[in-house]
């Protein structure tokens, strides 16, 4: 997020530049962009957050999650149901929904992280479909609204904002922007921490890590819980912004969109997946009008893995390094 | 009641065996899970629908697998071979993307509504066995499933290519030292696996509906089966398919409200007890 | 220190190790394990370090039965090993991987080990890109971190020339005697073993043939008949 500051006196400069960028980015689009553009950009930010959760797990732990949408959509459903059926206040419902899906992710993770990465990928796909089936069950139709989904609106305020504020693209942008920065910087720090180094080492050589005295299971479960927390934040912001949840928000379609956004931007670092989310949202607007969103998704997966494995941002960084060698000494982040 | 239950689960398992064993075969050779397998099955079903309209069911059951085998050859030459040096995860993602593309093209051509084809006259109606009336078509499905199990077993056990496939699946390194050409084997296995997906697609026509979501439903079911069976184990996949068929059918009879969840519960239980699945597949790193 | 009792390992119907007893206790002395291909040398190490569950028998460490302990537990409690096929972290730099493991195991002698294994000039290179001989030294260095009491080494000289192997063994002998480590080395190169090891065990077809000093082993008639031949 802040770039690779490689010598100590450049760190404050990077922080100042980051703060300026953060401030400008939070305020300017509200004045410059149309409501329609902002609405797309908001969707892009939230997709970017989901993509970030997918990308972090890919680049740090070497695991591909194809069930991100079940956390994303599931948190929205729980938020709505906690308010309408269980009479919780909006704030309590958000906390409840967040904790519940993260707990679910922890149990699921504890179960499936033990398998190999390919089986992990299959299992996350299966678990995601399971959640979609749960929501569609006849028995819970009164709660979930079945195939129609739920309109979600709340009375009172969350963080001093009314439901209408969250639905307003201009008012929502600074919230999404702040969340993206907070989470982006957090994940970037984690990847720089001992946990990040441990995860990458486990990804490269799990056996050697065990033979170096490391527990190789717990760090991966922790990583899985962490990325699910990010997906839950993205899902909760989405339901506040969009005002409804539907089975589509739980489905494989959203999971693969997040995957594509991550691949587009590049899975290493925080900037790539977030940029990927924005690119995807605008591209989807273009292609979706012709009913070809899914086709775009499929083609983008193939294209970015086969031809541009580093994604747009990764590719740009590499290009800049080639043109301006020594702009930052690459510190072997893997 | 029990007999009917078992017969129904065998009918469903027959389709699943044809698809899941194809997945397990490719995995054994290339360490790749073909996430596009569901789309191949869907292609088989829609092609079966079109071809059967012209030639009738029986010829479709012959022609479609041949067409799908050609698709398998294309898959081998244009995807699996060029991406041999990439990680298994990347190749799996590429097959996922290709599967989405194929599914979308099929929907683009055929539209969104569900289709169905009729079973040929000789397979329609019911037959009475041991005092039970049972649809002939499902008996036919069970026989086809049994037939594919037997031919798979005979091939793996008694032919040299089958022996090589088993050797590579158990230890690719040793097999390479023995001079086994895994590229040639992979061509054979990938086209066979696609052809079986084609047979399953045609057979599904009169039994299940032909609709735009069929690829996802089937690939998810097959992935569950492959994981339960122990990734890469063919015997495990067959046993898991039988188990899956049984709990699916029993679930819809005894727990109609939550039938859709029963397979997932089975999956979770197996994962709790044996994270590697029930079969003895090769564990990968 | 390390005591193996009645250890058997089966691979399917193949018996790789049959009822092997071994007692390694001399600190500061290299204990070599030699034997023809298929004698069960690597299997013995795998079973001792927990990589493979024995079919029967016990592994004792400091008197305690550790047969069912995990690999990570054994490592944290002082049992370490290196691998025949180099097992390192290819995308991390040499420094990153050594620091990661040293920090985890609370070892502050990283600099000593870097000097001992002569890795000073490779620290900032990605481990996957350095020469194979250097990778082997990284592998051994990873095993040396955390002050292990027992070091199990599987053919540390594999892939090295005879001269390099001999030099590595000299390194190892120095290190082992300096740190008072109990060290077990599986090795193909019989001459290197006889030159540097204080004790030698000979395995043949999964069975324990003989244990003794190099001089005793050279004269042992069973060993000569089964393995060394008259040339030795």
Image (cartoon, rainbow, N blue to C red):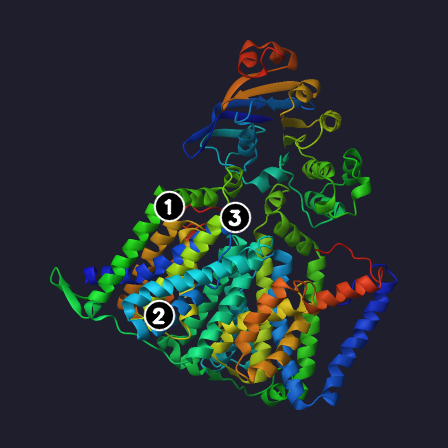
Point out residue B46 in the picture as x, y percentages from the top left corner: 38, 72
Point out residue A289 in the picture as x, y percentages from the top left corner: 56, 85
Nearer-the-camera pick, A233 or C154: C154
Q: What residue did someone put label 1 on?
A: B156
Point out residue B92 in the picture as x, y percentages from the top left corner: 53, 59
From the viewer's perspective, is A216 left or right of B200? right
- Looking at the image, do the residues carrying marks 3 and 1 touch, with CB atoms under 8 Å apart? no
What secondary structure is marked by label 2? Answer: helix
Residue drawn 36% across and 78% down?
A: B114
Q: Is residue B172 above or below residue C210?
A: below
Image quarter in which the N terminus of chain C is found: top right
> Which chain is mark 3 on?
B
Q: Based on the displayed image, in which of its 4 quarters is residue B161 positioned?
A: top left
Q: Nearer the viewer, mark 2 or mark 1?
A: 2
Q: Earlier in the sequence, mark 3 or mark 2?
A: 2
Q: What residue did someone put label 3 on?
A: B284
Residue drawn 53% across and 86% down?
A: A153
Q: Based on the displayed image, in which of its 4 quarters is residue C50 positioned?
A: top right
Q: What residue did someone put label 2 on?
A: B48
Distance between the alpha carbons at the discs numbered 2 and 1: 28 Å
> Which chain is mark 2 on?
B
Q: Is residue C109 above or below residue A254?
A: above
Q: Nearer the viewer, mark 3 or mark 2?
A: 2
- Looking at the image, do the residues carrying marks 2 and 1 touch, with CB atoms under 8 Å apart? no
Nearer-the-camera pick, A308 or B177: B177
Badges 3 and 1, same chain: yes
């Amino acid at each position: 997020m802040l770039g690779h500051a490689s010598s100590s006196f450049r760190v404050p400069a990077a922080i100042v530049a980051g703060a300026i960028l953060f401030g400008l980015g939070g305020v300017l689009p509200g004045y410059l962009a149309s409501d329609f553009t902002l609405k797309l950009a908001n969707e892009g930010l939230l997709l970017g957050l989901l993509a970030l959760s997918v990308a972090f797990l890919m680049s740090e732990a070497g695991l591909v999650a194809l069930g991100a949408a079940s956390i994303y959509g599931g948190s929205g459903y729980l938020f709505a149901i906690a308010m309408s059926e269980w009479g919780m206040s909006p704030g309590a419902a958000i906390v409840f929904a967040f904790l519940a899906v993260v707990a679910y992710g922890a149990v699921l993770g504890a179960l499936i992280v033990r398998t190999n990465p390919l089986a992990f990928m299959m299992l996350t796909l299966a678990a995601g479909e399971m959640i979609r089936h749960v929501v569609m069950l006849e028995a819970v139709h009164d709660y979930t609204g079945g195939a129609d989904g739920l309109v979600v609106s709340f009375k009172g305020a969350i963080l001093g904002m009314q439901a209408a504020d969250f639905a307003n693209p201009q008012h929502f942008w600074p919230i999404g922007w702040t969340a993206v920065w907070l989470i982006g910087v957090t994940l970037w720090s984690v990847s720089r921490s001992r946990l990040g180094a441990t995860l990458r080492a486990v990804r490269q050589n799990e056996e050697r890590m065990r033979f170096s005295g490391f527990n190789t299971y717990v760090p991966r479960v922790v990583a899985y819980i962490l990325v699910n927390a990010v997906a839950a934040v993205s899902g909760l912001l989405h339901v506040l912004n969009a005002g409804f949840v539907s089975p589509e928000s739980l489905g494989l379609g959203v999971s693969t969109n997040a995957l594509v956004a991550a691949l587009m931007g590049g899975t290493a670092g925080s900037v790539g997946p977030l940029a990927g989310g924005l690119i995807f949202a605008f591209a989807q607007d273009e292609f979706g009008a012709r009913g070809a969103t899914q086709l775009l998704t499929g083609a983008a997966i193939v294209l970015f893995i086969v031809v541009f494995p580093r994604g747009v941002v990764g590719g740009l960084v590499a290009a800049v390094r080639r043109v301006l060698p020594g702009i930052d000494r690459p510190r072997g982040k893997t | 009641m029990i007999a009917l239950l078992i017969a129904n689960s065998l009918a469903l398992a027959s389709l699943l065996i044809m698809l899941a064993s194809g997945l397990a075969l490719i995995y054994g050779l290339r360490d790749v899970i073909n996430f596009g397998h569901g789309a191949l099955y869907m292609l088989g079903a829609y092609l079966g629908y079109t071809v059967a309209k012209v030639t009738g069911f029986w010829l479709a059951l012959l022609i479609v697998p041949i067409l799908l085998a050609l698709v398998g050859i294309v898959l081998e030459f244009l995807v699996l071979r060029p991406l041999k040096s990439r990680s298994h995860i990347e190749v799996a993602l590429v097959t996922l993307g290709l599967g989405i593309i194929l599914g979308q093209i099929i929907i683009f051509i055929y539209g969104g509504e569900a289709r169905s084809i009729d079973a040929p006259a000789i397979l329609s109606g019911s037959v009475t066995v041991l005092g039970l009336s049972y649809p002939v078509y499902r008996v036919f499905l069970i026989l086809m499933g049994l037939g594919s199990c037997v031919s798979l077993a005979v091939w793996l056990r008694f032919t040299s290519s089958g022996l090589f496939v088993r050797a590579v699946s158990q230890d690719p390194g040793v097999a390479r030292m023995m001079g086994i050409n895994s590229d040639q084997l992979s061509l054979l296995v990938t086209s066979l696996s696609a052809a079986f997906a084609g047979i399953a697609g045609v057979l599904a026509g009169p039994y299940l509906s032909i609709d735009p979501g069929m690829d996802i439903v089937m690939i998810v079911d097959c992935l569950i089966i492959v994981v339960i069976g122990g990734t890469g184990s063919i015997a495990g996949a067959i046993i898991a398919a039988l188990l899956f068929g049984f709990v699916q059918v029993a679930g819809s009879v005894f727990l109609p409200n939550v039938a859709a969840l029963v397979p997932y519960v089975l999956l979770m239980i197996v994962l709790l007890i044996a994270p590697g699945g029930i079969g003895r597949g090769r564990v990968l790193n | 220190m390390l005591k193996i009792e009645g250890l058997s390992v089966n691979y399917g119907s193949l018996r790789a190790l049959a009822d092997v007893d071994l007692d390694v206790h001399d600190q500061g002395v290299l204990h070599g394990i030699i034997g023809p291909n298929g004698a069960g040398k690597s299997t013995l190490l795998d079973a001792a370090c927990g990589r493979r569950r024995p079919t029967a028998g016990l592994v004792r460490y400091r008197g305690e039965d550790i047969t069912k302990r995990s690999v990570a537990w054994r490592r944290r409690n002082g049992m370490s090993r290196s691998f025949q096929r180099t097992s390192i972290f290819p995308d991390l730099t040499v420094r990153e991987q050594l620091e990661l493991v040293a920090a985890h195991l609370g070892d502050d002698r990283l600099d000593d080990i870097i000097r001992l294994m002569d890795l000073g000039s490779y620290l900032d290179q990605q481990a996957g890109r350095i020469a194979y001989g250097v990778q082997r030294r990284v592998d051994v260095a990873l095993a040396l971190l955390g002050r292990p009491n027992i070091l199990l080494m599987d053919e540390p000289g594999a892939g090295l020339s005879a001269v390099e192997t001999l030099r590595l063994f000299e390194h190892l002998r120095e290190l082992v005697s300096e740190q008072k480590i109990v060290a077990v080395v599986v090795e193909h190169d019989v001459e290197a073993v006889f030159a540097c090891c204080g004790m030698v065990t000979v395995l043949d077809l999964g069975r324990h043939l003989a244990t003794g000093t190099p001089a005793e082993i050279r004269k042992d008639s069973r060993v000569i008949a089964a393995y060394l031949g008259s040339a030795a």
